[in-house]
Amino acid sequence: MKKSAVMFFVLLLSVSLNATSDDTDGNVYLGFGLSSLALDSERVEGVPTRSPGHTSKIGSLLLGYQFNDRWSLDLSLGTDLSNNVDTNQFAVNGYRFFGEKKWKPYISAGLSSFSIDDATVDQTEQFQAGLGISGALTDKLELRVGYQHFFEFGDESYNDDAVSVGLNWHFRKPRAVAVAQSTPEPQPESVPKQKEVVDTFELLVQFDFDKSDIKSVFKSQFDEIARVLQESPSISMTVEGHTCWIGTEEYNQGLSQRRADAVRARFIEDYGISADRISIEGYGESRPIADNNTKAGRESNRRAIAVILRPRIVSE
């Protein structure tokens, strides 16, 4: 049994010393402990060392290192404060903690050396194993309450027990408080507002009396309308022919048709516009835009017109 206990201690101590790569940074701690040590009844002749009134009350100072949230190791030096049995103790202990809460259970294992006045054997080295609970009173102040059982290594089979309570002050840096970083909502790309506008292109060709010939002065208008028709293959147009009121209605009707057809032929022949995109309509003298009683008015009424509406989308 002693051999198994020693092997368990060596394993626990080895794991503790190699645990520095775990979750949190390590820190040194100092502590003070008080334990009630019930010595084996065979240790001191004639003294009931296991009775409550004769147990040693050991006050201890300790120096330790907390490797992470799960492992720690400390050295302690204690002496009897009650004068029941004059006992001094030096101990090395390793601790394994469990859980993530403020209060954590733990197991412990270690080695200790007892110096006991008036004992059958005044100096003993022992293995100890125990369990307890650790509580974080603050970020730096820790409370430990535990129980330990001691096995003597020598020829004598001493078994001692202790119940202890201690306070440890950890010299750790304040833990950074995680501040939730608000992730800005992705904003939709700004899409410019758009609207539809309609461009208007007008053709106005005027004719001499009783003529359907197109004068060269109107070429620029033909160029512009032809460009629009070439750029927008889906657009078609209607050419309207008109006359003044001189002549019979039947004659003027035919003249207005010839004027509209002359305009249509110009787009087809000179600009290559498809014939099925241009329709014509002759209105004769029925739609004057000026007074036929005046020369200037009659000249204005001798005309052919076309209007193209081309919609397009623009950003506001």
Image (cartoon, rainbow, N blue to C red):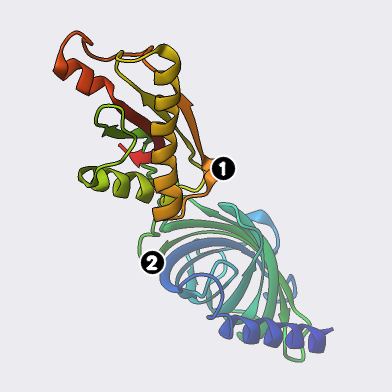
| Front in this rendered view, residue 268 or 78 | 268
Is 299 situated left or right of 80 in this image?
Answer: left
Q: Residue furthest right?
A: 1
| Front in this rendered view, residue 271 or 81 | 271
Quarter the N terminus occupies: bottom right
**Which residue, given by chain and number where applicable, does mark 1 sit on?**
276
Is 235 situated left or right of 5 in this image?
Answer: left
Quote the CA–CA distance across marks 2 and 1.
Answer: 91 Å
Q: Position of residue 94 (x, y in %)?
A: 60, 76
Quarter the C terminus occupies: top left
Disc sitting over residue 172 in the figure: 2
As shown in the figure, which amino acid type bears the numbered disc 1?
A: Asp
Mark 2 vs mark 1, foreground winner is 1
Disc sitting over residue 134 in the figure: none
As shown in the figure, which amino acid type bears the numbered disc 2?
A: Arg
38 over 265 or under it: above or below: below
Tell me where residue 251 sits by quadrant: top left
